[in-house]
Amino acid sequence: MKIAILSRNAKLYSTRRLVEAGQAAGHEVHVIDTLRCYMSIASHKPEIHYKGRVLQDYDVVIPRIGASITFYGTAVLRQFEMMGVFPVNESVAISRSRDKLRSLQLLARRGVGLPVTGFAHSPDDVNDLIQMVNGAPLVIKMLEGTQGIGVVLAETRKAAESVIEAFLGLNVSVMVQEYIKEAGGADIRCFIVGGRVIAAMKRQAKEGEFRSNLHRGGTATLVKLTPEERATATRAAKIMGLNVAGVDILRSSHGPVVMEVNSSPGLQGIEKSTNKDVAGMIIRFIEKEQRPNRTGNKGARG
Ligand code: ADP
Ligand code: MG
C-alpha cells in the first residue's frame, strides 16, 4: 500500500514509529507536511498539490493533525477523502473531538459517564454556573486547550469566580467541571485501535500538580483496566467515530468518567510504558480495513 502520513514534523516519535512500522510491513510510506498541501477545491477531479507536484495514488492517509492547525489540517484531510483515500480517522471525527464541549455533549447524549460539567457565555451567569457544578473546588478549561495548558484548578469559590470572569472577559470560551479529587492527580489513557483498547497507561501528575499530562511532567506506568473502564473507553471512541483514539478516563467515586477523547494520541508514552508495538497495530488495522473509497461518515451526528 501507499501510505501518506499527514504530519508537520517527520522527526516526531509518533511519526517516525508509524513510518518504521509501515515500511517493516512492506508498504511505501511518505510523510507529508500538512501545511504544505494546497488544492483547487472547485475542480471536479479533486487533487492535492504538494511542493510543486501532485499527490497521487495513495491508498491510506494517517492524519496526525496538531490542535493548532485543526482547521487547515481537516480541510486537507477532506480533500484526501474526496479522492477516495482511506483515512485512519475521518475529518469530521477529528473536528468533533477537537471541541471539548461538543465531544462531551455527544458522549452525554449516549449516557457515557462524565464529570459534572457546565458552560456559560455571560459573566452575569457565573455564580449560577458554579452552583450548577456543585461549587468549588472545580476545574476550569479552555474549550480548545491541549497538553494541560488552559486547565485550571480553582480551589475556592472566589478564585473560581475571578478566573471564569477573566476568561469570559477575554472572550475565551471555557467549561467548568466538577473536580475529581479522588483520582489523586492520575488519569488513565486508553489507546483504541479499531474499536478495541490495545494498550492503557496510568499517568500520574508530578508532586503538587493535578494535571497528569506527560507534557506537564506527569509519569506513565502500566495499568490494568476494569471491564467497565474498557467498555467506557471503547464506547467513547465509537461515539466520536474515531478508529484510532486516546480516551482519557478519571477513576471517580461514581465509576469511570471520560475527560476527553484525543484523535491524534501520541505513541511515545504508551509504547514506552506498555512495551507494545502500537504503531504496528495501527498498520495492521489499516491492512484489514483499507478499501478504495471507504471514507464514510461514522460516529454520532453533530
Ligand atoms: P488537555 O486537553 O489540555 O489535556 P484535559 O481535560 O485532559 O485537558 O485536562 C488535563 C489534565 O487535568 C488531565 O489529564 C487530568 O489529570 C486533569 N483534570 C482535568 N479535568 C479534571 C477533573 N475534572 N478532575 C480532576 N482532574 C482533572
Ligand atoms: Mg488531556
Image (cartoon, rainbow, N blue to C red):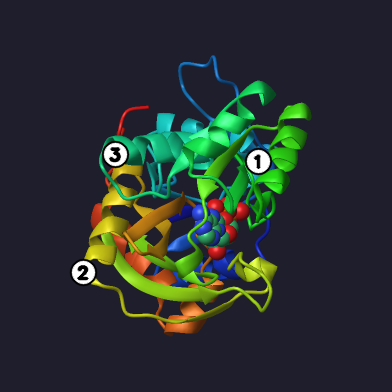
At 50% from the left and 31% from the top, the residue drawn is 79
Left or right, 64 with reference to 148 = left
Q: Secondary structure at mark 1?
A: helix
User: In the figure, 234 relative to 20: above or below?
Assistant: above
Binning the other alpha carbons within 10 Å of mark 3 as few (below 14), some (14 to 19) or many (20 upward) gives: some
Binning the other alpha carbons within 10 Å of mark 1 as few (below 14), some (14 to 19) or many (20 upward) gives: few
Instruction: Say which of 58 and 95 sits in front.
Output: 95
CB atoms at circles 2 and 3 under 8 Å apart? Answer: no
Instruction: Say which of 302 and 162 sits in front.
Output: 162
CB atoms at circles 2 and 1 under 8 Å apart? Answer: no
Residue that label 3 marks: 294
| Three-letter residue code for mark 1 | Ile
Residue 81, image x, y percentages: 42, 34
Which numbered mark, 2 or 3, is in the foreground of this view?
Answer: 2
| Three-letter residue code for mark 3 | Arg
Does the rendering let one see residue 273? yes
Residue that label 1 marks: 69
Residue that label 2 marks: 227
Indicate which disc, 2 or 3, sits on the residue closer to the N terminus: 2
Q: Secondary structure at mark 3?
A: loop
| Three-letter residue code for mark 2 | Pro
